[in-house]
Amino acid sequence: MDYIELLEKYMQGLTTPEEEKALLDWIQHDGDARSTISAFYEKRWKETPDTGVSAELQYKMLMNIKQNICQHEIENQSAAGRKIVWMNVMKYAAAILATMVVSVFSAYYFYSSESDVKNFVVYADKGQRSNLVLPDGTKVWLNSDSKLEYDNTYGVKERKIRLTGEAYFEVAKDKEHRFLVSTGLMDVEALGTAFNVQSYPNEDEITTTLLEGKVKISTPGQEAILLPNQQACFGKSSNGLSVIEVENAKYSNSWTKGEFAFNGATLEEIAKELSRMYNMEIKFDSDEIKEYNFSGVIKNNSLTNVLEIISLTSPVVYEVVNDSIILDKQK
C-alpha cells in the first residue's frame, strides 16, 4: 500500500473510513513512518514551484487532519465512556499530529508572487504540542495554541523568528548570526543558549526564562540582560519590564517533557493553562477558589491527574459536563 499517496488523499478529505484506519494504524505503529513522511515532503519542498500552497489551504489541511482523527475515534466510543475516553482521543490525536503535522505542514511554505520571500509557519493548536528543528540546527518545542514563523532569509544576516504563544528554544551556536525571537512587544536575542518564551495574545504578561547562556531582552524603550535562573517579565498594560531571580528555572520548560509544573500559581492561572493544553473550557462556580495558590510538579500531566491532585490537596471539587469542567469549593 502506498501510504504517502494515502496521506495526500487523506489531507484532502477524500479517504474512505477503511483507508483512514489503515493510514492511522501505519502512522501509530510503524517506526519508519515519520522518516518516510519527512523525506517525501522535504523532497517535494525542494521541487515545489514558486506558486506554492496558499496559507488558507495549508491551515484547512491541518484542521482536516485534526478533526478527522478526533471524529474517527469518538465515533467508536460508547456515549457512557466519552467523558474519560475524551482524554485518550486527544492523546492519540496529539501523538499522530506530533509525528505527522510538523513534518508535513512545516514542509509547505507561504509564498507571495510579489516577493522572493517565502514564509514558513508552524502551528500547535489547542490541545496539541509540536517540535521542530530550524535550518541552523536550533531545536524548538511549541506549546499549545502557539504559532512560530520564519522566512527563507533565516540565517543569511540573522536568525529571526516570530512567536505567538509559548516555545522553548535550544539555540545552535553561531556567533556570526544573532538569534532573535520577536513577540511584537518583546524581542529576545541570543547567541547560543536555552530559554523559554511565553507570549499569549490574551495574557497581559510576556515572560522569558533563561536556563543556560545569556540573552538580551528588548521592549519599547527598555533593555535587560538575563543570566541563568533569571526571568524577564513585561507588562503590556503597564509597559514595564522587570527581571527577577527564579528558584526553579528548569520548570519553565517542564511542559516539553510532558510535565506540569507551577510555583505559587493561582487556580485561575492553572485553569487557563489547562484550557490551552487540553482545549477544554474550565469554569468556576466559586470566585473564592480562583485565588487559591498551588506549587508542585506533576509528572503525568493528564487532565484527570492534575484535577485529582488539586482536589486532593485543596477544598476544591470538579465535575466534567460535556466539553467543560466546572470547579467549585468543597461544601
Image: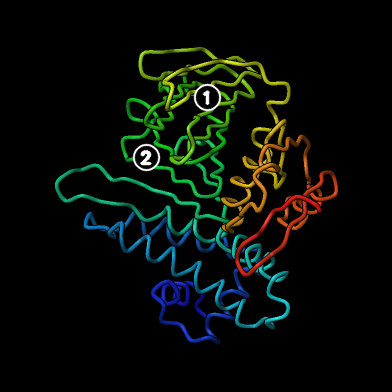
Q: Which mark is residue 270?
A: none
Residue where numbered disc 2 is placed: 150
Tag 2's secondary structure?
strand
**Amino acid beneath label 1:** Lys
Q: Quadrant of residue 176?
A: top left
Whether residue 112 is situated above or below residue 246 in the rendered picture: below
Residue 286 in percent (x, y) is at 67, 49
Q: Residue at x 43, y 38 (%)?
A: 163
| Residue 192 coordinates in the image, percent (x, y) | 54, 23
Q: Disc 1 versus disc 2: distance between alpha carbons?
A: 18 Å
Report the mark closest to the observer, 1 or 2.
Answer: 2
Looking at this view, name the residue that lies furthest to the right: 312
Q: Earlier in the sequence, mark 1 or mark 2?
A: 2
User: In the picture shown, does residue 216 fall above or below 71?
Assistant: above
Q: Nearer the viewer, residue 13 or 113?
A: 13
Q: Which residue is mark 1?
A: 173
